Amino acid sequence: MNGYVGAQHRFHDADFAQGWSDRFVPSPPRVALFDLILEQAARPSIANAHVLELGLGPGYLARHLLDRQPDITYEGLDFSDAFFEIAKKTIGPHLRRVTLTKADLLDQSWPKTLSRQPRAIISTWTLHDLGSQQAVEAVYARCHETLPEGGVLVNGDFIKPQGTSWVYEPGRFEIARHLELLRKVGFSEARSLAHLEPNIENPTAAQNYACLAALR
């Protein structure tokens, strides 16, 4: 069987953003991804540092890390005011440790909007929506420029699984290509930590995501 895997979003629309958030309430596999990201963000060289999330969305990952890392500060970058309003409610009492930064990752100047230099940059289910491998590579390059030596990038995102006969939207591509792009822009120790909710034969748009990590 084959078909097309992709999705269209209207994240500036408040009703759409709320509906998307309701569908993406963390399930056990999604929490497993959050824990993998937490493990990387809690490395000794990163602990008690400033963490930047690309694509804050509804704030589920932010809440997960802020609950478990009482000494970090957090910056959530997004282009959607609708998501900021949802995230404020999700993050709740931790909001005093959070900076909300509005920026578009397709604009190469987004690092200039940051409040301070992060030691960890993290993301979930965001970069594939930029629409191309070239756009993802550009974000990886800006992350490499932004992080200090010893910093870490962790990207949990939808991928195209190896061996599939399905056509995937351009922003969803193979793990090996992600690792190639990370190395190309200068990251070391680029690796895949997990392939979560794998489904090759009959995938949905909410399956097949990987946790990719690399060191600056």
Image (spheres, rainbow, N blue to C red):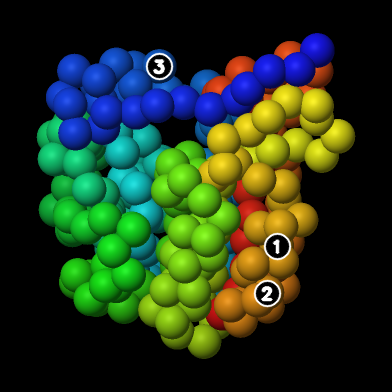
Looking at the image, the residue that sits furthest to the bottom is 149
Asked if labels 1 and 2 touch by Cβ distance under 8 angstroms, the answer is: yes
Q: Secondary structure at mark 1?
A: helix
Residue 152 seen: yes
Quarter residue 97 falls in: bottom left
**In the picture, residue 51 is in which quadrant?**
bottom left
> Nearest the camera: 63 or 207?
207
Mark 1 surroundings: few (<14), some (14-19) or many (≥20) residues within 10 A = some
What residue did someone put label 1 on? 179
Please tell me whether mark 2 or mark 3 is closer to you in this view: 2
Q: Is residue 3 above or below residue 119?
A: above
Quadrant in which the N terminus is drawn: top right
- Within-10-Å neighbours for mark 2: few <14, some 14–19, many 20+: some
Distance from label 2 to label 3 (Cα)? 34 Å
Task: Check disc 3 and give the amino acid type.
Answer: Arg
User: What residue does disc 2 label?
Assistant: 183
In terms of sequence position, does the residue under pointer 1 or pointer 3 come before the other?
A: 3
Q: Residue at x 53, y 61 (%)?
A: 134
Callout 3 environment at 10 Å: few (<14), some (14 to 19), or many (20+)?
few
Residue 182: percent from left, percent from top: 63, 69
Residue 28 visible here: no
**Residue displayed at 26% across by 49% down:** 78
Q: CA distance from mark 2 to mark 1?
A: 6 Å
* Left or right for 23, reference 207: left
Look at label 2 and name its amino acid: Arg
Residue at left 63%, top 61%?
213
Question: On the image, numbered disc 3 is attached to which residue?
Answer: 23
